[in-house]
Amino acid sequence: MKRYIPVSRVEGKASRQAHCDLPEGTFEREMSKEGFFGPAAFFHHRHPPTGWIEFTGPLQPRAFDLAKLAAGPDSPWSAPEVLVNAHCRIRYWRLPGRMARLARNADGDELLFLHSGAAELFCDFGRLALVAGDYVVLPRGTMWRIESGSPVDLLMIEATNSSYQLPEKGLVGNHAIFDPAMLDAPQVDGEFLAQQSDDGPWQVEVKRRNAVSTITYPFNPLDAVGWHGDLSVLRVNVRDLRPLMSHRYHLPPSAHTTFVANRFVVCTFAPRPFETDPGALKVPFFHNNDDYDEVLFYHAGDFFSRDNIHPGMMTFHPGGFTHGPHPKALTRMFQQPKPATDEFAVMVDTRDALDVGAGAAAIEWSGYVDSWKGRP
Ligand SMILES: [Fe+2]
């Protein structure tokens, strides 16, 4: 048995409620354990903790403009790696249209997020039509291919050696945020049966230990006439999410957890009303994200806490990097001109440090660390 050493103190001029009623003219910074679940301290600083005049060394935050990656290849296993560790592999794939071969991931479950375009997914389980904003969970071992008449941009997040699960929803219950009944599964329909053919060859690229093996069949192996069971490819769209909010408290990002895997979580920011209580923060609080590396992919909308960020970009804040609202957003700390946020973003928080992949270096925005400069 073990537990955190108990502390509960209020020192100096301080609020007793996190993210609310800050001493006049101060900026709140949270230092915490276990993401936002463990013990935490809330400091009231006289200056924004991101007010540095110079920042050197490897803890610098990074930003990548994934929309600038060249189109191609037609295999997901050749898509550029952006951020990688032993438990999580993030790629960005600009599929020109149609996959010539089937793919199968033997390394772990794959989560696809369709950033732009529309496509048909054909897989062991049947056919599923996909639109922008779809998350698709592909259980490890699923054979699949994507077909589209036009380019499709996909974020791919591999749960290396583990499985995607839903988070515990605790006090708000199983049907909050999205009802499990909203999950769509592929169907063995006329179009699926029509793509089955015996006039091969068909190839399957199987990825195991990040190396690809190719299996050639004289027929299309997506030839199931039916199936039953309690495992399937599943889809939910970000526009089907009904995010939690409190009118009196700025909820931490963990309130927006959509999927969990081993040693990382995937959260979704979807439009929600701003807090209305006059003393409640209306922007994210400053924090170091001490126990997690934090990745944010910007899908659509107006990203209220970030300047110079547009759809298709990804930011990476290594654990220990202090961040929070940009100077312009800070001026709206307690008063927002609009009633609601207007952003869709995918966040990946990993418990272990991520490495930047070779594919990302060429499309890095090197000025990101300076984007917090300037006084509110
Ligand atoms: Fe953060």
Image: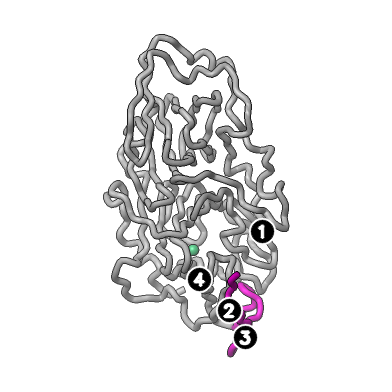
Q: Quadrant of residue 63?
A: bottom left
Quarter placement of the N terminus? bottom right
The earlier-in-sequence mark between 1 and 2 is: 2
Residue 66 vertical position relative to residue 182 in the rendered view, above or below: below
Which residue corresponds to the image point at 46% horizontal and 38% vertical from the top-left?
Answer: 116
C-alpha separation, residue under disc 2 versus residue under disc 3: 16 Å
| Circles 1, 2 touching at the beta carbon (< 8 Å) | no
* SS at badge 2: loop
C-alpha separation, residue under disc 1 versus residue under disc 4: 19 Å
Indicate which disc residue 286 carries: 4
The earlier-in-sequence mark between 4 and 2 is: 2
- Using the image as rendered, state which of residue 228 and residue 20 is in the foreground: 228
Indicate which disc residue 5 carries: 2
- Number of residue marks: 4
* SS at badge 4: strand
Q: Give the percent coordinates (x, y) of residue 66.
A: 37, 46
- Quick check: can you spot residue 56? yes
* SS at badge 3: loop
| Circles 1, 3 touching at the beta carbon (< 8 Å) | no
